[in-house]
Amino acid sequence: MATANDAFVAFDSVQKSYDGETLVVKDLNLFIDKGEFLTMLGPSGSGKTTCLMMLAGFETATHGEIRLDGTSINNIPPHKRGIGMVFQNYALFPHMTVAENLAFPLDVRKIDKAEKDAKVARALDMVQMGAFGGRRPAQLSGGQQQRVALARALVFEPDLVLKDEPLGALDKQ
Amino acid sequence: MQFEIKHIADSLGITVVYVTHDQTEALTMSDRVAVFNDGRIQQLAPPDALYEAPENSFVAQFIGENNTMAGEVLEIAGGVAQVRLDSGDIIDTTPVNVRGKGDRTRVSIRPERVEVNPTTLGAEAHTLKATVREFIYMGDVFRTKLSVAGNDEFIVKTRNRAGQERLEPGQTVEIGWLPEDCRALDA
């Protein structure tokens, strides 16, 4: 099991406050192994989503350090962390086809066309959406759109994938 | 689709950090689950440890279904906490986060670890009298609501096995469980 020194993802004494008074995350120490599937579970307002957002880079830690593969990422912006994100508020671009949606993060990374096409095809096949590359998001079911969102997170072959919970998910508790 | 993430991540060796408040998703997909409340991790454990050995009342209540009974610790010795329930019944429990005599505790037991026919459990099983309040047929399982030691919402889940008795409201029965399945947690 991962320790502070060899963890792939490390939250080291992390705190988060939005108003400078109340801590929404209080002294978090969490060390995640490479290849581990770790779930943050809790009721609304428990701090779990804030932790995910700090790891993604959309929130900054008030105190402590977050490391990825041994390197502090506190000051690295989200798009440079190399993390795949399946986030509900990352909608698919409606005017692009499925394949174009997947190619978009690769265009940003300036990858040549043949390699790009191969990566897009591979990612779509992984989520069994290989036949849908030419469709637009509006022509897909909700579940198919989620698969495409997952493929888009996988297309640049990240070592770490984050997934938040669906918006409007009802609390079963 | 949720489970597919698990399969893809496993096959590619990808690390996944997943946020949910759906405990079934958390239990079925994770290597480990971090249960959050009030800005802190309450417990970090593999799914089976989290479900079977919750370390505090919050985790016991949040994960799965649980019967609780309030009481006071009489004695802790030899890995057993003797608890006097507020109903007056004295039971043996596994001490988890109680320190000693006089501590208030919430004793917690899972509905599927309670036997309606406690003779199957052996001599060390603890038994209590219970009154049946409601019997709910769910196909694969029976859900029976009982009054036990002052708790009128005590649930027992029984597999619909061949010959399994279907209890009737008003019936008095003897129920039982093993002390190791009965955990003395914070009040």
Image (cartoon, helix red, strand yellow):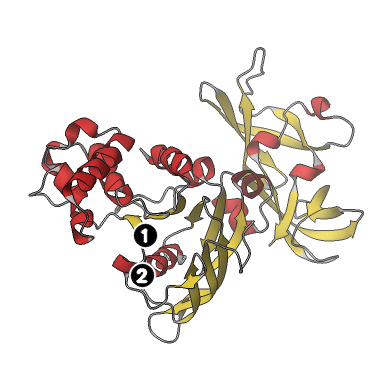
Which residue appears at 72% of the width and 36% of the height? Answer: B130
Which of B56 and A14 lies nearest the eye of the viewer?
A: A14
Residue A165, position as x, y percentages in the image: 36, 53
Please tell me how crowded label 1 is: few (under 14), some (14-19), or many (20+) other residues with Cα within 10 Å: many
Q: Is residue A129 visible?
A: yes
Which residue appears at 76% of the width and 26% of the height? Answer: B117
Report whether mark 1 lies on the same chain as mark 2.
Answer: yes
Chain of residue at mark 2: A
Q: Mark 1 is on which residue type?
A: Ile
Q: Quick one: SS at disc 2?
A: loop
Give the vertical position of B105 relative to A96 (above or below): below
Q: Which residue is mark 1?
A: A83
What's the CA distance linking mark 1 and mark 2? 10 Å
Residue A13, position as x, y percentages in the image: 56, 76
Q: Is residue A127 visible?
A: no
Which residue appears at 59% of the width and 58% of the height? Answer: B58
- Picture quadrant where residue A148 is located: top left
Residue A141, position as x, y percentages in the image: 20, 36
